[in-house]
Image: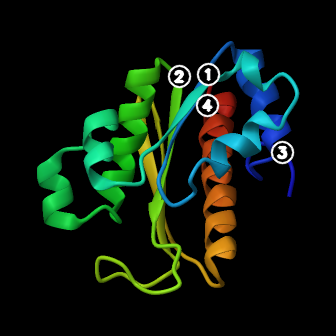
Amino acid sequence: MTGLAGGDPRSLVDELRRRAQSVAFAESLTGGALCARVVDVPGASDVVRGGVVAYAADLKSALLGVDQVLIAARGTVDPGVAEAMAQGVRDRLGASYGVATTGVAGPGPSEGKPAGTAYVAVAWEDGVRTLGLALDGDRAAVRAGSVDAALGLLGEVLDEGRNAP
């Protein structure tokens, strides 16, 4: 699928450039793959502010401002953590949109959650949206599916803004 709602990186970069807006990425299970996928697009430097790979829980707090109490209560694989990561990277990197990924790539469970459990979130000035995922496959498939889902969610948010009256 191409286009904004399909999460096509070229379409996302073009739309962000057209709007004079920017994006930043906060990644855990995707380990930088999300940001890398977008910066593969020529001209991405016009819209990408940067990315933070915060694999460890303490870095999610220190670098992205995720509440340590939230992490202690729910773990790092949680929709609230994904939302806080997206908001934190948006604020800290000065972007129009923050996009985050967190989850369990596998092969086994983590924090009592099965492999393939993931959350992606997009934060912007007026809100935040989170998507929960239950992905099949090995580590590579879970990570790739999370990247695709995060780009698709960003595309949906951009589409809604573009189609608003």
Q: Is residue 129 left or right of residue 44?
A: left
Name the mark nearer the viewer: 2 or 3: 2
**Mark found first going from the N terminus, 3 or 4:** 3
**Mark found first going from the N terminus, 1 or 3:** 3
**Mark found first going from the N terminus, 2 or 3:** 3
> Which SS class for mark 2?
loop
Query: Is label 1 in contact with label 2 (beta carbons under 8 Å)?
Result: yes
Real-space CA distance between mark 1 and mark 2, rounded to the nearest whole angstrom: 5 Å
> Which SS class for mark 3?
loop
Name the mark nearer the viewer: 2 or 4: 2
Q: Which residue is mark 4?
A: 161
- Residue 144, quarter of picture: bottom right
Q: Is residue 131 visible?
A: no
**Mark found first going from the N terminus, 2 or 4:** 2
Query: Is label 3 in contact with label 4 (beta carbons under 8 Å)?
Result: no
Amino acid of disc 1: Ser
Q: Which residue is mark 3?
A: 3
Q: Against 147, is 4 above or below?
A: above
Q: Is residue 93 visible?
A: yes
Q: Which residue is mark 1?
A: 22
Amino acid of disc 2: Ser
Q: Against 103, is 64 above or below?
A: above
Residue depicted at 38% across the width and 43% down the height: 85
Point out the image quarter for the N terminus: bottom right
Amino acid of disc 3: Gly
Q: Which residue is mark 2?
A: 96
Real-space CA distance between mark 3 and mark 4, rounded to the nearest whole angstrom: 14 Å
Real-space CA distance between mark 2 and mark 3, rounded to the nearest whole angstrom: 20 Å
